[in-house]
Amino acid sequence: MRELLAAAVYMVALMNPISKVFILSVLAQKTEQRDLRHASIQASGVALLLLLVLAAGGKWILGEIFHVDIYSLRIAGGVILFVIGYKALSRGIFFEVKETESLTEVSMVPLASPMIAGPATITAAISFQPQFGLLKTALAILIAVVTNLLVMLCAPFIAQLLTRHNLMGALIRITGLAVATIAVQMVLTGISEWHAGL
């Protein structure tokens, strides 16, 4: 049970629910709440399916089709995640949404992927499976996606509360620092695994 909880909490941290609050609060200004809820549920469903499929067969796909070791995925995922974290830290945003993009487009990219099923969560899903087994990994992914979805559904209210107290920018930057730190750790773990396999 402790392993499952730890894996789920780590997955939630990688999904970074706060990153969705800003985007959804911007969309809420020109979108009906019902449509926003539908987009959040749709994005979460697609991301959940993607993560479960990769948890089940990702290691095989990496090894047999692409001939890539998990440490390479950790390093690549860490580098990409660091760029995202640095952008949030320096500019105060995780992702930008163009006004011309439809809600359906946004629900797939960037909400479903890479904001929920991104390089870090995909790496975790694939690496958790041999470590914890498929059932625990699937449960951890499910718990994390549902937790993230709950935050997404409450995003307009959370954003209003944060904006009222001038905390939105500060929280995004603090979260960006945490994301960049996790990214560095992913890279270091990948390098350590690569070195151990020499």
Image (cartoon, rainbow, N blue to C red):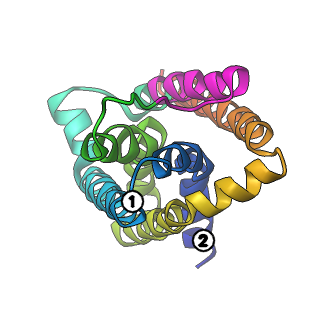
* Residue appearing at x 25%, y 35% in the figure: 62
x%, y% of residue 137? 42, 64
Q: In the displayed structure, would residue 183 be above or below residue 138?
A: above
Query: In the image, what residue type sits under mark 2?
Result: Leu
Q: In the displayed structure, would residue 170 be above or below residue 82?
A: below
In depth, the one of 39 and 181 nearer the eye is 39
In magenta segment, residue 4: no
Dots 2, 1 in contact, CB < 8 A: no
Give the alpha-carbon distance from disc 2 to disc 1, as whole Å: 35 Å
Q: Which residues are the magenta region?
A: 76-96
Q: Is residue 85 left or right of residue 117?
A: right
The image quarter containing residue 151 is: bottom right
The residue carrying pointer 2 sits among few (fewer than 14), some (14 to 19) or many (20 or more) residues within 10 Å by Cα, namely some
* Residue appearing at x 58%, y 58% in the figure: 156
Pointer 1 residue: 32
Secondary-structure class at tag 1: loop
Of all residues shown, which one is farthest toward the bottom? 1
* Residue appearing at x 17%, y 34% in the figure: 64
Q: In the displayed structure, would residue 83 be above or below residue 85?
A: above
In depth, the one of 121 and 3 nearer the eye is 121
Pointer 2 residue: 5
Of all residues shown, which one is farthest toward the right? 165
In depth, the one of 28 and 173 nearer the eye is 28
